[in-house]
């Protein structure tokens, strides 16, 4: 997420931290570099100019206190202004007391609306709501079928009418369905177009005027840069939506849309999509995102993901096994599956402070866990519980069965032995020990 932007900013901040004084001369060059970096990231030029002006004025107007250096103060000002640029504070989803509370999903075709609608439904289920999806994209081939499949994957009902060509009628019928079946949130997936056209805008305007949704969420592909910002402005001028959703942040994203859109349309970013899986959705926290962009990590989000992924009862059982030194490959497999629940490795690593520069020339291999699982699943039950019997011929058979090499099998067994040593001293809640035990800090990069 924003690796290129983060790496460049980290280099500039490293120079700034070394400053012994604050004056117009020694901050001019770093700010010029930041301006260039933002332009390269396709950030709106008005937003860039305003940001640089604010940072400069506040840097020159600040008195340095004894507890921090001048360079640290400038970095803090940059961080504060970046948080402000991204929205200052998180904006919660608005759920009305009316049943159902209606959420209208709008945006261009290809922005990821349908997938996001399903992700949001799954997210709301985890918060105790009973969502329903409404298939109101009657134009795109297979759009209804796609929503039905996604709804099935997250066990959320999907209302659809493949015979009707009246979008408003379908939407109103889905509202009645929710009322009759005690479904408290209705998420409506609307049609998109390859470009903005009057028919599309009229259709979503009618839905807004007739349904009175509590939220209108504009979904935008973050990889489109300034185009995303221009589209967001046109949609907002017509619809006055309530929030922005940034999708595909796990892709080759420069960061221009994320850094520009809040200032241009004056609407909060509410969620970001960071992967293809239905649980790859995060509520947007401006202060956490600013920290990630500046290479300072996001430990709070990391801990939250770990808490969601790790089963406390299962962890207690494993802890007991660690103490008795009974940890085997079955337990290793359980831990791998729990780590996978946290999301793509690239997203996880980006939350760790100082990792941005290490990612610059490295490729994150998100399939590493799949390979490890394949190796373990190719073992017999006896081999998993008693790794001491894994001789050369057994290792060769496991490599052939898992589609890997003997070197891969040997590496996993070595990691397992190292992990066993660490886990003997494992104390409750120390996820760091597990990560170190798996040598992730060395082996996630290929």
Image: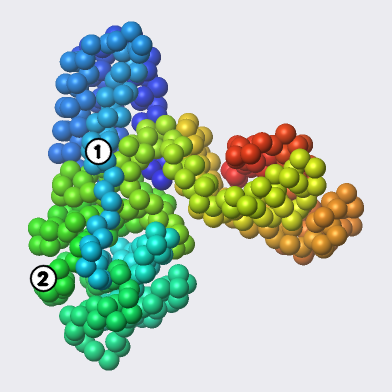
- Rendered-image quadrant of the N terminus: top left
Q: What's the residue at 24%, 89% (across, down)?
A: 164
Q: Position of residue 403 (x, y in %)?
A: 72, 62
Relative to 136, residue 370 above or below? above
Residue at the bottom extreme?
163
Q: How is the image coloured?
A: rainbow
Q: Position of residue 405 (x, y in %)?
A: 75, 55
Q: Does residue 312 show up?
A: yes
Using the image as rendered, state which of residue 134 and residue 76 is in the foreground: 134
Q: Is residue 225 left or right of residue 432?
A: left
Q: Does residue 257 show up?
A: no
For label 1, the crowd category at 10 Å Cα-Cα, with few meaning under 14, some 14 to 19 and many 20 or more, is: some
User: In the image, which disc is placed on residue 88?
Assistant: 1
> Going from the N terminus, do you reach mark 2 or mark 1 first?
1
For label 2, the crowd category at 10 Å Cα-Cα, with few meaning under 14, some 14 to 19 and many 20 or more, is: few
Q: Position of residue 201 (x, y in %)?
A: 13, 70
User: In the image, which disc is placed on residue 163?
Assistant: none
Q: What's the residue at 29%, 10% (across, down)?
A: 65
Disc 1 is placed on an element classified as loop
Disc 2 is placed on an element classified as helix
User: In the image, which disc is placed on residue 209?
Assistant: 2
């Amino acid at each position: 997420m924003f690796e290129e932007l983060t790496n460049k900013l980290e280099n500039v901040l490293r120079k700034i931290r070394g400053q012994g004084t604050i004056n117009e001369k020694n901050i001019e060059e770093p700010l010029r570099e930041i301006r260039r970096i933002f332009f390269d990231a396709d950030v709106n030029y008005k937003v860039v100019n305003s940001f640089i002006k604010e940072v400069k004025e506040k840097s020159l107007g600040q008195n340095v206190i004894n507890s921090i250096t001048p360079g640290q103060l400038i970095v803090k000002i940059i961080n504060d202004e970046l948080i402000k640029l991204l929205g200052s504070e998180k904006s919660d989803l608005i759920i009305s007391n009316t049943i159902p509370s209606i959420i209208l999903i709008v945006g261009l075709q290809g922005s990821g609306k349908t997938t996001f609608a399903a992700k949001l439904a799954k997210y709301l289920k985890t918060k105790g709501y009973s969502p329903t999806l409404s298939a109101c994209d009657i134009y795109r081939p297979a759009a209804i079928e796609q929503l039905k499949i996604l709804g099935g994957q997250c066990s959320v009902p999907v209302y659809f009418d493949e015979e009707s060509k009246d979008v408003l009628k379908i939407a109103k019928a889905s509202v009645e369905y929710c009322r009759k079946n005690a479904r408290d949130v209705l998420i409506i997936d609307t049609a998109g177009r390859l470009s903005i056209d009057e028919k599309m805008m009229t259709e979503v305007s009618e839905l807004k005027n007739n349904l009175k949704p509590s939220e209108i969420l504009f979904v935008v592909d973050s990889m489109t840069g300034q185009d995303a910002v221009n589209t967001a402005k046109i949609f907002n001028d017509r619809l006055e939506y309530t929030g922005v959703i940034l999708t595909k942040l796990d892709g080759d994203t420069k960061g221009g849309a994320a850094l520009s859109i809040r200032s241009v349309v004056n609407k909060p970013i509410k969620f970001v999509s960071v992967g293809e899986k239905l649980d790859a959705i995060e509520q947007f926290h401006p202060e956490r995102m600013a920290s990630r962009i500046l290479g300072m990590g996001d430990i709070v989000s990391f801990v939250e993901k770990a808490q969601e992924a790790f089963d406390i009862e299962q962890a207690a059982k494993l802890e007991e096994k660690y103490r008795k030194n009974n940890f085997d490959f079955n337990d290793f497999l359980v831990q791998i599956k729990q780590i996978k629940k946290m999301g793509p490795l690239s997203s996880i690593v980006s939350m760790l402070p100082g990792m941005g520069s290490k990612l610059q020339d490295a490729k994150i291999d998100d399939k590493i866990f799949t390979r490890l699982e394949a190796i373990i699943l190719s073992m017999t039950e006896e081999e998993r519980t008693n790794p001491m019997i894994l001789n050369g011929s057994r290792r060769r058979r496991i490599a052939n069965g898992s589609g890997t090499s003997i070197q891969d099998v040997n590496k996993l067994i070595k990691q397992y032995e190292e992990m066993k040593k660490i886990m003997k001293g494992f104390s409750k809640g120390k996820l760091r020990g597990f990560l170190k035990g798996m040598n992730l800090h060395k082996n996630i990069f290929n």
